[in-house]
Image (tube, grey):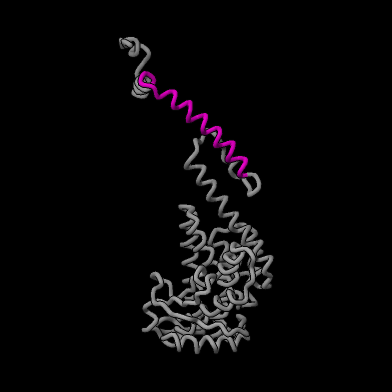
Amino acid sequence: MNLEQINELWTEYKERYELDSDIMIEGVAYDTPEFVEGCFDLIELMHGRYILHLTRRVHIYSDSYIRFILFHEFTHFYDFIKSDFEEKQDLFLYMNSYSEYHACRIALGHFIDRLTLKTVHVNKIQIPGPFKEISIRRLLEESLYRAKMGYDEFYAFYQPQDFVNCFRLLMYLFGYIALFKDQDEALAAQVLKVLRIKDDCYINLYHALKDQDIPLILDYCKECYECAFLMFLRDYIHKHYDPSLYDEDELESLTQDNYQEFLEDLDEQQQELDDAQEEMESPIAAFIAGCLKANTTHKDLSEFHLDF
């Protein structure tokens, strides 16, 4: 699909969702990473470069699946155009939460007009896949699997980028299940249970997403990110500070408000411990420490004749 065809569909999208804007997509690049079907680069958008990035495989996909991809990406573009944030952090949170939720809801909803479980059978209703149609159940299961793998990765290594990715995948799921109005609350709770998420901010965020309450969405997003940061912080302390300087109850009581004071105190104690360790690393002390480490007895030490 070339740029002209993409902009024709973009024009259709704008008319369908009543976007009053003359902005057009200025370029298309077939350069996304593996397993990424399409994306807009937020930094490029912020600099006025409206370039759609697509997978190289897009040329062999079915027309209906290409439309599925583009309606997802167009929704991100739509949300960016409609957004008005003074803080870059707020824009980042908005695009990685509401916009992901919104894009998945629009893309799936575009192919199913009946939006309750009473009329949409998750096993029987088929939606576009890359090469053949798939059931809605398979779409949900694959999305849940990817989100679980993402959160498991974060829980194992606590890397910030892992959290950004798995959080975005959860927003995908929230967008899909919000379409099933009779059972969406139960589905959201089940998803959070599978992902081992117990923080109330996530279910509160789901409610705010459904209500399109942007200030609340940003507040709950920040709370979710703060919870992840505190997990990262506890792991960081485990790896970089002597365990004799703290106990686990202290780490569990850390909050966004008190962690800085706790770290400053921990840094001071660690420095004192490091200084004491350095004093023990003189040639004589190192020699004696080596003897003690080798289970040398006091009697054995008396047999050494040290001349200084």
Compared with residue 245, is residue 297 higher up or lower down, i.e. above or below? Answer: above
Asked whether, in this view, residue 42 is left or right of residue 83, the answer is left
Residue at point 37% right, 79% down?
Answer: 57
Q: Where residue 284 sits in the image (x, y, percent)?
A: 36, 18
Query: Please, what is the dominant secondary structure of the magenta stretch?
Result: helix
Q: Residue furthest front?
A: 47
Quarter of the image where the N terminus is located:
bottom left
Quarter of the image where the C terminus is located:
top left
Asked whether, in this view, residue 301 is left or right of residue 244, the answer is left
* Span colored in magenta: 259-285
Q: Where residue 156 sits in the image (x, y, percent)?
A: 46, 53
Quarter of the image for residue 176 reads bottom right
Task: Residue 295: tell me if it is visible.
Answer: no
Q: Where residue 84 sits in the image (x, y, percent)?
A: 64, 71
Number of marks: 0
**Residue 99 part of the magenta-drawn span:** no
**Residue 266 part of the magenta-drawn span:** yes
Q: Where residue 135 sits in the image (x, y, percent)?
A: 48, 80
Q: Nearer the viewer, residue 22 or 38?
A: 22
Compared with residue 304, is residue 66 higher up or lower down, i.e. above or below? Answer: below
Compared with residue 262, is residue 70 higher up or lower down, i.e. above or below? Answer: below
Quarter of the image for residue 300 reads top left
Task: Residue 236: tell me if it is visible.
Answer: yes
Residue at point 50% right, 42% down?
Answer: 238
Asked whether, in this view, residue 135 is left or right of residue 79, the answer is left
